[in-house]
Amino acid sequence: MRYWSSCKDPGRISLRYYVGCSLVALSRLLRRVVDQIRRVVALPEQFALIIWTSSEIDRFARAGWNSRPVVRHYSRRDDWLDATEKTLVETYCMKDGELLNVACGAGREALMLARRRLRVTACDWSPRMIAEARRRAQEANLPVRFAVADLTHDLPYPEKAFDYLFLTNIAYSYIFPRWRRVRFLRQAHSLLKPDGVFIISFATASGEPRIPAGLLEWLFMRLRRWASFNREYEPGDRFAGDGFVHIFRFEELAQEFQEARFLVKEWLWEQCYAVLTKG
Ligand SMILES: C[S@@+](CC[C@H](N)C(=O)[O-])C[C@H]1O[C@@H](n2cnc3c(N)ncnc32)[C@H](O)[C@@H]1O
């Protein structure tokens, strides 16, 4: 009772309230306008996908990943990206086996896995990333074996050498086009021991219904018929953030795993992960 009696009139809406609402509405409107402008500004970047061939896209991507600012950014990382990575490692990498960390960057997860007593081998196609990863491993006195290797070519490891393969941070989506992804998966299949486990991460269309549909997709699928354009362009190929990515639909990714004779032990579609075995 004392509270109500101390308020002037709880039912009355003040002018100050309306001014606040107008400020919120104005801010939302401006945000929408800025988002639209950002989309338009990003369009020329998307067109690079249809102008370049896959090997030109690779060249551009590799230069980006190998650039000093990007390497510096990744070399500062020393923790699990999220709870998913940690849970997957705790669930599936129980015994002290041989682990291959592909697209390892500056060694973030390779170093953490080596601290867990796994015998870690790691590779990335960026010489600077590998040099930085090596330096960090030496500094931490961790026996990780590093190599510069491109996932789209032959990997320098013997068959059935690994208990675990680990590919984080949507790196499967950095491989173009589909036939090279399936080739990489087949190699991964042959590198794994019969009871091995492959933890793999990819970019998904969740939360973005326009991907991989949309006007741009329609246009690029028509342009790719012409010799001077990227004939290997596929729906879902995008320029996003750090570089080129392929954004998957569920059926498409499931088909690629199946083609390489992998069985999916666990799907974590929302978290952009899957756990694969040889069955
Ligand atoms: C997002 S970073 C992730 C680095 C590290 N795994 C991490 O999470 O901190 C992706 C890495 O994939 C590597 N990469 C991309 N395409 C590759 C390819 N075709 N072969 C080998 N490495 C590749 C890049 O050089 C980069 O270091």
Image: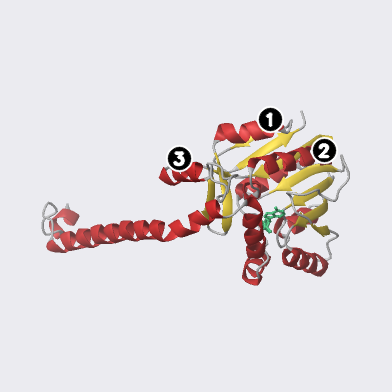
Return the x and y of residue 221 as percentages of the image width and height.
Answer: 50, 42
- Decide if residue 95 is on the left or right side of residue 229: right
Q: Work out whether mark 2 precedes mark 1 in sequence or the reverse, and give the earlier one.
A: 2
Contact check, label 3 and label 1, Cβ < 8 Å: no
Instruction: Calculate the distance from the C-alpha at mark 2 to the C-alpha at mark 3.
Output: 34 Å
Instruction: Report the amino acid beneath label 1.
Output: Gln
Q: Secondary structure at mark 2?
A: helix
Q: Is residue 9 above or below residue 237?
A: below
Mark 2 crowdedness (10 Å alpha carbons): few <14, some 14-19, many ≥20: some
- On the image, which quarter does residue 87 sit in? top right
Q: Circle 2 sits on which residue?
A: 190
Question: Residue at image x 69%, y 43%?
Answer: 180
Cβ(mark 1) to ligand 1 < 8 Å?
no
Of residues 77 and 5, the one drawn nearer to the viewer in this rendering: 77
Q: Secondary structure at mark 3?
A: loop
Instruction: Report the amino acid beneath label 3.
Output: Ala
The reply to whether residue 77 is in sight is no
Return the x and y of residue 273 as percentages of the image width and height.
Answer: 62, 42
What label sits on residue 213 in the rendered view? 3
Return the x and y of residue 196 as percentages of the image width and height.
Answer: 80, 37
- Decide if residue 140 is on the left or right side of residue 265: right
Question: Residue at image x 76%, y 59%?
Answer: 111
Instruction: Calculate the distance from the C-alpha at mark 2 to the C-alpha at mark 1.
Output: 14 Å
Give the quadrant of the C terminus.
Answer: top right
Q: Circle 1 sits on which residue?
A: 258
In which of the image's four quarters is ligand 1 placed?
Answer: bottom right
Of residues 249 and 274, the one drawn nearer to the viewer in this rendering: 249
